[in-house]
Image (spheres, helix red, strand yellow):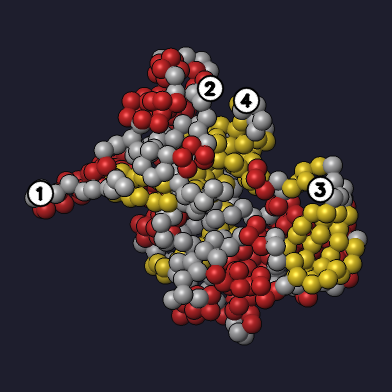
Amino acid sequence: MTTLARPTGHDPRSRLRDTLVSRVDIARKVAAVTSLDRKALDAWAAAALAATVEHACRNSPFYAGLVPAEAARAVAQGRPHAFEAIPFTTREHLSAAYPLGMLAVPRREVIRFDESSGTGNGRPIAAFFTMADWLENNLTVAGLLAAVLDQRDVAAIAVPYELAGVGQDLDRAIEILGCTIVPLGAASPSCTPDRMVDALLRSGATTLVCSGTRALFLGEIARRRGIDPRRDLAVTKILMAGEGASAAKKRRLADQWDAVAYSMFGMTETNTLAMFCRRRELHLVETRTFFEVVDPGSGERLPDGSVGELAVTTLASRAMPLLRYRTGDVCRIEAAPCGCGSPLRRLQHRGRIGDRIPVGDRWTSQLEIEDIVLGAMTAGPYYFAFGIDGDVLEIALPPSGADDATRASIAAGVRDRLGASARFRRLDTQRFETALRTSAKPTMRNFSAYGGGGAAGEG
């Protein structure tokens, strides 16, 4: 297999000096782009989009074969709607190109090689970054995180550090702000959930970075050990990465931790795509990415305010440019100004297309089910699992959530919001928690198979 190689034979002191000078130049570039107003940002993005298409078609063998030459020329010439003639890129394309087929720079320029989790066929996808790609993203994310973090914060990061770049990306961005980092990682034998709670207590962590599901689980672990997250831990901010979160989950986190929950959105192959502001709105990182919402069936581009599938085009990725990459996320883009003053448009994340669930004669999402169930539960642990039986939504609940009042409230929500009936059963809590302890990326989506014992009633 072809491997990535670094150049040798250059004077180390000159190489170090050149690296430091280039980092200063990159920082100045990021500062200039992130300070643009909306009109200037649109003009910059149009030029960056044309440059990205030209770079991809010239230097990526994949895009040279995918994009018709006439379509590339039309984009370069700025013809109206020319970009919409560019074919979509899919995850299947990236999987088929693994490991090095999407590379668009000489291998010596690559400083990071990341991989995502495997797809349905068991093949992962790779992601590459030059030093400029990586540092520009770190600095951009740091600037956005500065809305709520500063040098007084101690950030405990409980997301994967291995292969997938999310842990390294957030670690370095938060470090740039002068915060103290507690690198917990995810599902490591050397840092179990109990040790994570110990680290939160000993370090005085003010910020927990992880999925919302993991945060709920760590809060439950602390409670069982006699540690009250609200009283005994210093966490006041939870930065959620790795899964979407319903409004009900955010309320449960606030209740459990006495903390504010903020959402982030990104993926291994693109780095960060959207980041929160101080008003807890999710803003698109339009200084690095061009965003479209398209009809999931026809691929037609939809106007702002429409709900559809998010497609992204990188504007600042030399190593691995992506053109019209269909993310599989159901989203809505809001162009109205935010009260925080940012010129960046806002994103509403509605779940994954692959997570759409047929209930009776309509489709719903896991996030909507989560909102109904967690919104009705009044005591932890805040776990549940679900399955579909025709027009009946079967929900498995832990003993603490199986009282008559909770079941009645959930059944009413399922009936009123989904037009379906609910049936309940006991959750196999032990199997569920074992999965939580060993999963590198725990989300409610992982656990639909953990409904345990017999039925507990129907509503």
- How many marks overall? 4
Give, as a three-letter code, the residue at label 2: Glu
Secondary structure, mark 3, is strand
Q: Which residue is mark 2?
A: 84
Q: Which of the two residues, 59 or 267, is positioned nearer the viewer here?
A: 59
Give, as a three-letter code, the residue at label 3: Val
Q: Vertical placement of 346 versus 454: above or below? A: above
Tell which tag, 1 or 2, sits nearer the viewer. 1
Q: Which residue is mark 4?
A: 300
Secondary structure, mark 4, is loop
- Callouts 1 and 2 close, C-beta under 8 Å: no
Secondary structure, mark 2, is helix
Q: Which residue is mark 3?
A: 359
- Callouts 4 and 2 close, C-beta under 8 Å: no
Dot 4 or dot 2: first in sequence order is 2
Label 3, label 4: how far apart the Cα atoms are: 27 Å
Dot 3 or dot 2: first in sequence order is 2
